[in-house]
Amino acid sequence: MKFATGSPKDTWHPMVKADTTTLTYWLNWRVYLCSICLLVPAIFSIVLIWKYESFRKPARNGSLESQKEKEEEEEEVSQTLYEDETWRPCLRGIHPAWLLAFRILAFSVLSVFLIFNASKQGGKIFYFYTDWTLASITFYFGLGSLLSLHGCYQHQKKASGDKVEVEIDIDIVGSDSPDLEQGTYHDPPLPLSSITSNQDKDLGFQEKNEHLVRQPAGACGYIFQIIFQMNAGAVMLTDCVFWFVIFPFLTKKNHNIDFIIITTHTINAVFLLTETALNCLRFPWFRIGYFGLWTFSYVVFQWLVHGFVKLWWPYPVLDVSSPFAPLWYLSVTILHIPCYGIMALIMKMKHTLLSAWYPDSYLCVK
């Protein structure tokens, strides 16, 4: 196997095996079975999203049982995404500016790869699932950079507000106080009952104030979280298929592999895993539906293109002329579950380890 930067003669290129624009290519039992492998997961994904996504409020009716209403409220709260979770790091000691810097770096590097592929392949860039995923994760880091920039502004604004409160307290005490000049000022002692009462009031006010200040995320926040989870599964799928299926095949055939292809199928996972370790986003299981619809959209796009234009298939598993096509489609469909499960497991490990190592500063919601 050799690495190449151009297009030498021995570079692997798919071949056209059949005319995809004829009716006989599409009207057969293989396409029917492949359609079932596509439609059933797509319908299941839509049902998952409709049932669990918090786009709509649960219906409130006085005739409903109180226990059912309580369960719906608890489920809605657990699925609520707060605005600060889109830009806040998972540890209190990490400044949001670090997450902003990382997202800007990731967006810049991925944009370079995307522009390079576009200049090299032209309109064929979106012919591959890898390039779809690369464009999606680039958009994710671009949107994340904007949200982090807004979050840093809010963080700085809050820090400035805290300084103003300290200055106000100094003015109330008085700058002429001798203890204040020596830096040893203390509040006058209060009765124990008064201290306890004031502490309870302060704690209650603080909890209430934090609850009021923390705002639910808007549409951009939810879109950001959805794209994160969709990319998590898509990146795992593309990289696993490339490194465990395509790469060994090309190595065995001694074909050249473009260095950009190698890097693209590596750096996207590196950036995604680093983002996963740093951010404060949740990872509910039901959003595997978006991952399924993403792949479904790509396959439908390929079918429509090949229905009108005689082209080679970017991936051999998509060619429905093979008698094993239904088995390939079913296998790829099932592969979505472990690919998404790997990221869910990584998130679980993150929660377990960081909450044990940094119990006082870990901010993520499990």
Image (cartoon, rainbow, N blue to C red):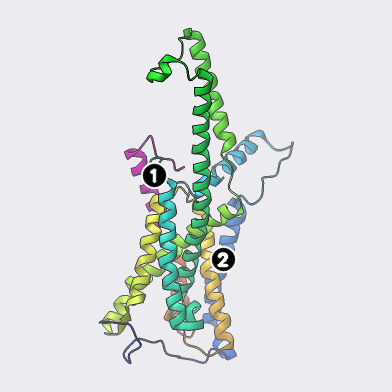
Q: Main secondary structure of the magenta part?
A: helix
Sooner in the amino-acid sequence: mark 1 or mark 2: 2
Q: Which-is-in-front pick, marks 1 and 2?
A: 1
Rendered view: 293 above or below 171: below
Left or right: 255, with 116 as reference point: left
The one nearer the camera, 185 or 47, is 185
**Other-residue count near label 1 (Cα within 10 Å), few / some / many at <14 / 14–19 / ≥20:** few
Q: Where does residue 271 sit, x and y in percent of width and height? A: 38, 60
Rendered view: 200 above or below 43: above
Report the quarter where the C terminus lies.
top left
- What is the span of residues highlighted in magenta in the rendered image? 341-365
Report the quarter where the N terminus lies.
bottom left
Q: Residue furthest right?
A: 62
Label 2 belongs to which residue? Answer: 42
At horizontal 43% and vertical 78% (from top left) the residue drawn is: 117
| Dot label at residue 237 | none
Q: Is residue 351 magenta?
A: yes
Instruction: Write down the quadrant of residue 240 in the picture.
Output: bottom left
Under mark 2, the amino acid is: Ala
Question: Separation of disc 1 and disc 2 at Cα?
Answer: 40 Å
Rendered view: 324 above or below 73: below
Is residue 318 among the parts visible in the rendering? no
At horizontal 58% and vertical 55% (from top left) the residue drawn is: 220
Left or right: 114, with 150 as reference point: left
Under mark 1, the amino acid is: Ile
Q: Where does residue 288 sit, x and y in percent of width and height? A: 50, 58
At horizontal 45% and vertical 62% (from top left) the residue drawn is: 233
**Other-residue count near label 2 (Cα within 10 Å), few / some / many at <14 / 14–19 / ≥20:** many
At mark 2, the secondary structure is helix
